[in-house]
Amino acid sequence: MTEIDAKMVMRLREMTGAPMMDCKAALKETGGDMDKAKDVLRKKGKQVADKASSRDVKEGLVYAYQHHSGKLGVLVEVVCETDFVARNEDFKAFCRGVALTAAAYSPIFLNRESVTAEAIAKEKAIVTEMANESMKGKPQSVIDKAIDGRLDKFYAEKCLMEKQYVPDDSKTVEQVRTELVGKIGENIQVRRFFRVELGG
């Protein structure tokens, strides 16, 4: 079995931002495998985020980003439980990352829950017609799966929380939020955003 030393724990902490004791426990659980330990920490973060999601969020930041050209600006409201966390550098960095993501991708909705019924119905009608035409003769269950897949693409394209997080495009905004909740231990939510572009 691999010996878990302080250097390994520090390296994992630097990669994930998770607390030292959690990093040590994850490395022990995975026999020193860094990649598996990162997955363990990610799952733990998701569990913490799920538990925290029902707690009140009354603090936070309204973060403003203006593009260097002066022709594009974004406001995001990101909330948390305490003003202590609202002043935390990781929290502020997340706010900035959310604003940069909104600036880069120009999403229309915050998340799936905020997509209007009208927009869903319109998109579903379009993708259903496309799937029925391009998949003629296939079983209905296969066509239905294709329709669901195309709707998932629609959400990924239109919803801020499903966009690739600009500072680290290997994750979505929602995945980064979940990891931050796991790291900090408080409920953190992106409540709303406004993107304004000159002439847009």
Image (cartoon, rainbow, N blue to C red):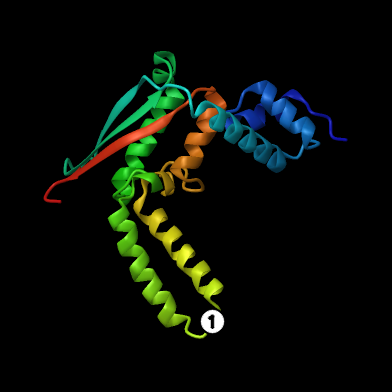
Residue 66 position, x and y percent, is 23, 37
Assign the N terminus to one quadrant of the image: top right
Q: Which residue is painted at 46% across and 41% down in the image?
A: 174
Residue depicted at x 48% and y 27%:
54
Residue 39 visible within the image: yes
141 versus 57 height, above or below: below
Q: Is residue 76 above or below residue 6?
A: below
**Mark 1 residue element:** loop
Is residue 133 depicted above or below 87 in this figure? below
Q: Residue at x 33, y 41 (%)?
A: 100
Which quadrant of the figure has residue 16? top right
User: Residue 11 at x, y = what percent?
Assistant: 66, 31
Nearer to me, 149 or 43: 149
Residue type at mark 1? Lys
Q: Is residue 99 above or below residue 128?
A: above
Q: Which residue is mark 1?
A: 138
Query: Is residue 15 something that shows in the picture?
Result: no
Provide residue 91's location: percent of width, then percent of height: 43, 26
Is 75 on the left-hand or right-hand side of 43? left
The foreground one among 6 and 45 is 45
